[in-house]
Image: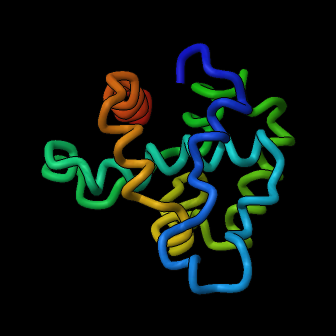
Amino acid sequence: MGNLSVGEIGSLLPETARGDLDKKSDPVHKSWDAVTRAALVILWGLLVYPRLDPVMSKRIKEPVVDRNVVYDLFYEHIGSKEVWEEILNKLKRYDYVRFRDGDTLTAGTRLLTAVDAAKMYKVYRTSVLVRRLNQSVERKGED
């Protein structure tokens, strides 16, 4: 996410998720703080985008990422390790992420449905940084 600020990363989340137009309430993440929203964008790019990208989806059946690798790559946006753990607990509680084998994260139902994939896809598809990020995460996970 390069030199983007937390607010700029978090602003990439669409204001209304697809399907939420008929509902009375906004997506729960709409009211979250900028750091949590930025983490949500980062995790969407790591756990959902690879499923949608034609090239990446051939290589990756179900994207997963190590929680510590994400923190190591984005600590300047996330803050302290304690803040990161609080964010992960919130995302888990609302089923945006799920834990596997301790430190491994995978997309939860809300990460797949509450975020407007069509809008986010356009942002990520045009970003060379996203491909580098996913390659970086894959390499770090192999270490």
Q: In the orientation shown, which residue stands out farthest toward the front?
A: 21
Q: Whole-percent x and y of residue 128? A: 32, 23
Position in image of residue 80 (x %, y %): 84, 31
Q: Depth check: give the residue in front, 98 or 129.
A: 129
Asked if residue 89 lies left or right of residue 96, the reply is right
Q: Specify whether 106 is left or right of 72.
A: left
Q: Where is residue 38 in the image (x, y as percent from the top left)?
A: 67, 40
Residue 143 appearing in the image: no
Q: Residue at x 62, y 34 (%)?
A: 9
- Hey, which quadrant is residue 23 in on the image? bottom right
Q: Position of residue 70 (x, y in %)?
A: 57, 36
Q: In which quarter of the image is the C terminus?
A: top left
32 versus 68 height, above or below: below
Please state which of residues 83 and 41 is positioned toward the viewer in this rendering: 41
Question: From this viewpoint, which residue is outermost toward the bottom?
Answer: 23
Image: 60 above or below 115 = above
Q: Which residue is drawn at 41% across and 58% down?
A: 117
